Image: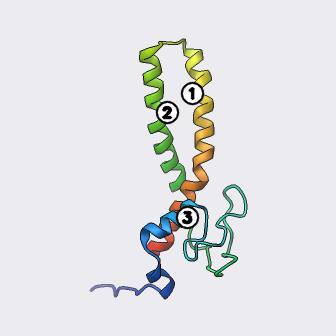
Amino acid sequence: MSVPAVEPGPERRAVGVLDALKRGLRRRCPCCGEGRLFAGYLAMRERCGTCDLDLEPCRADDAPAYFTIFLVGHLVVPGILLLEQWAAPETWVQLAIWLPVTLVATLAILPFVKGATIGAIWRSRL
């Protein structure tokens, strides 16, 4: 027994996957690209102010945090290893450099990754 395919609405047919990701990455509504996606730093709006899209079903949960850790880890770990090879600083120097870099990079990237995740979720109808 097969499940019938659900035909996407007209707004989803008009928006491609990459467009939805780009709009989310800009922290805009994945449907229209104009309305703001977040009411605060990471707090989602309930509806798009421009196209009235219901954003409530697009819950990203923990996925943006995992993707952000993945990205920041791939930026920070090579830096740690290269600095260790070139200068071999004391452990406290490594910590004084890389802990703030990790914190700032994580907090800077997280809203953009969450927006892109929301765009992908909206486009894939999850």
Q: Residue at x 68, y 69 (%)?
A: 45
**Mark 2 residue type:** Val
Q: Secondary structure at mark 2?
A: helix
Q: Secondary structure at mark 1?
A: helix
Mark 1 and mark 3: span between their CA atoms? Answer: 29 Å
Is residue 19 at all visible to an observer of this figure?
yes
Is residue 60 at all visible to an observer of this figure?
no
Q: Earlier in the sequence, mark 2 or mark 3?
A: 3
Label 1 near label 2: C-beta < 8 Å? Answer: yes
| Vertical order, 20 against 10 (above or below) | above
Quadrant in the rendering for residue 112:
bottom right
Q: Earlier in the sequence, mark 2 or mark 1?
A: 2
> Where is mark 1, residue-wise?
98
Residue 41 position within the rendered picture, expressed as x and y whole percent measured from the top left? 69, 55
> Where is mark 2, residue-wise?
76
Q: Is residue 41 left or right of residue 86?
A: right
Number of disc labels: 3
Mark 2 and mark 1: span between their CA atoms? Answer: 7 Å
Q: Residue at x 51, y 83 (%)?
A: 11
Residue 43 position within the rendered picture, expressed as x and y whole percent measured from the top left? 69, 61
Q: Residue at x 44, y 15 (%)?
A: 86
Mark 2 and mark 3: span between their CA atoms? Answer: 25 Å
Label 3 near label 1: C-beta < 8 Å? Answer: no
Indicate which disc residue 24 carries: 3
Quadrant in the rendering for residue 42:
bottom right
Q: Residue at x 63, y 44 (%)?
A: 107
- Closer to the camera in the image, 1 or 105: 105
Q: Residues within 10 Å of mark 2 (few under 14, many from 20)?
A: some
Q: Secondary structure at mark 3?
A: helix
